Amino acid sequence: MKKIIVLSLLVISGVFIVGCGENKGDEDGRNEGKQTITYAIWDTNQEKGMKEMANSFEKENPDIKVNVEVTPWDQYWTKLDAAATGESLPDVFWMHSNESYRYMSNGILMDLTETLKTSKKTSLDNFPKNISELYALDGKQYAMPKDIDTIGLWYNKTLFDNASISYPDETWTLEIFLAAAKKLTDEEKGIYGFTAVNNGHEGYWNFIFQNEGKIMSADRKTSAFTDPKTVEAIQFYADLINKYKVSPSADQLAENKPVSFIQSGRSAMGFFGSWMLADFKENDYMKENTDVAVLPQGIKRASVYNGLGNAVAATTKHKEAALKFIEYLGSKEANLISAKTGAAIPAYEGTADEWVKNTENYNVKAYVDMLDYAVIRPFSNETIKVETVETEKIADLLSGKKSAENVAKTIQTEVDDILK
């Protein structure tokens, strides 16, 4: 008896197209003839790599065809929710740590524990434990780790050269970073030293962890946002806008895509995740003028990391084929294909160097080097709700309406209420 899936969102338009006419399968996954499964992803920049992996899988499994289906991030979850409600989910699909608990706890994802335990193709031992834990609940594994990312400091070499400032490297501290940002800022020309965006992952979380601050308790059941070092870090972050004037204002950043500032020479530095590399490799201005370095050091080094997972729909009618594909996606062979196509830093340990070799124009090794001291992004059973509160309250700080101490108290109170 299939578990009834209850989701708050009942939109039924635009559902993923799953299953194909040539399938003649039964609900146990035993099929006659060739089976077709759907693999849903959201990043067009990774489409080529995912298709190459699917093609390689098909060569090993000529009785299975994999259709890679791309839906942009801003539509992906709406469509996935609708498909879950209608029990028409793609057979295999990407999962994000923001959404994993909701999907795992509602019985939407297939339990992969036994498959991964007995697989001769892959093992969770080949992946960082923290990434695996993002997709585990009550001792069961619901997704195979796919990739891993860190946050890097992108900088405009032309603006640095014009200001006679040495490029950022591993010797940079936050003091050097701030001094450079001040020197690079030219408000009359509309050029800023840095973009302090209202974003934890590509923004203030990194400053918090570099300052030895805390965001969640160790058991992830309460907020730790009033930790004095956390308050100090977010105050420094807001000061980049309101005190030092080295960043566009909160209003300017809200009215423009933050990445547009560095892509147009209006910002000399910005924090961006390794998933942005594919975009930057295609941008002529970025190719000509920019490079990436490790983040500047605070009290200690830190860069926030996260990782995606590959999941199987609990309701798939092609269970056997979908599980075969999941095992393949977790193999070293598949992860090396992902690395060589530059899709993302593979989560499979020992394959990141291939991703670095694929990129000649940028110092992307910086992203991999930071894995030695990276900190897993904050997550809980209510990640989306918690981050929504954070974003709303941090906006008051970045706009100068409230102090860091006041905002931190509000965040801690509201997050604790959510996590009760």
Image: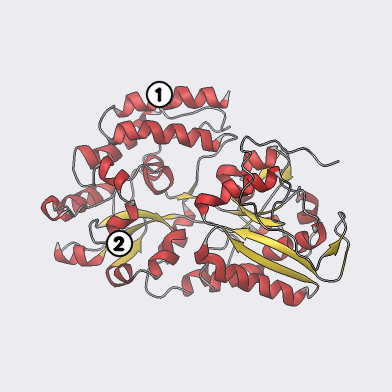
Left of 31 or right of it: where is 236? left
Badge 1: how crowded within 10 Å, few (<14), some, or many (20+)? some
| Residue 363 placement (x, y as % from top left) | 38, 68
Residue 122 appears in the figure: no
Q: Is residue 241 left or right of residue 145?
A: left
Q: Amino acid at mark 1?
A: Thr
Q: Is residue 361 above or below residue 5?
A: below
The residues bearing labels 2 and 1 have C-alpha atoms spaced at a distance of: 35 Å
Q: Nearer the viewer, mark 2 or mark 1?
A: 2
Q: Is residue 320 left or right of residue 411?
A: right
Q: Quadrant of the C terminus?
A: top right
Percent x, y for residue 296? 32, 52
Point out which mark residue 410 bears. 1
CB under 8 Å between discs 2 and 1:
no
Which kind of residue does numbered mark 2 sit on?
Gln
Residues 93 and 366: in front is 93
Mark 2 secondary-structure assignment: helix
Please give the name of the residue rendered at 53% of the width and 65% of the height, measured from the top-left corner. 46
Q: Position of residue 356 (x, y in %)?
A: 47, 70
Q: Is residue 159 above or below residue 206?
A: below
User: 170 or 122, which is in the foreground?
Assistant: 122
Identify which residue, 415 or 163, lies in the foreground: 415
Residue 389 in percent (x, y) is at 45, 31
Q: Residue at x 53, y 73 (%)?
A: 341
Q: Residues within 10 Å of mark 2 (few under 14, many from 20)?
A: some
Q: Quarter of the image holding residue 2?
A: top right
Badge 2 is on which residue? 263
User: Element at badge 1?
Assistant: helix
The residue positioned farthest toward the left in the image shown: 188
| Picture quadrant where residue 49 is located | bottom right
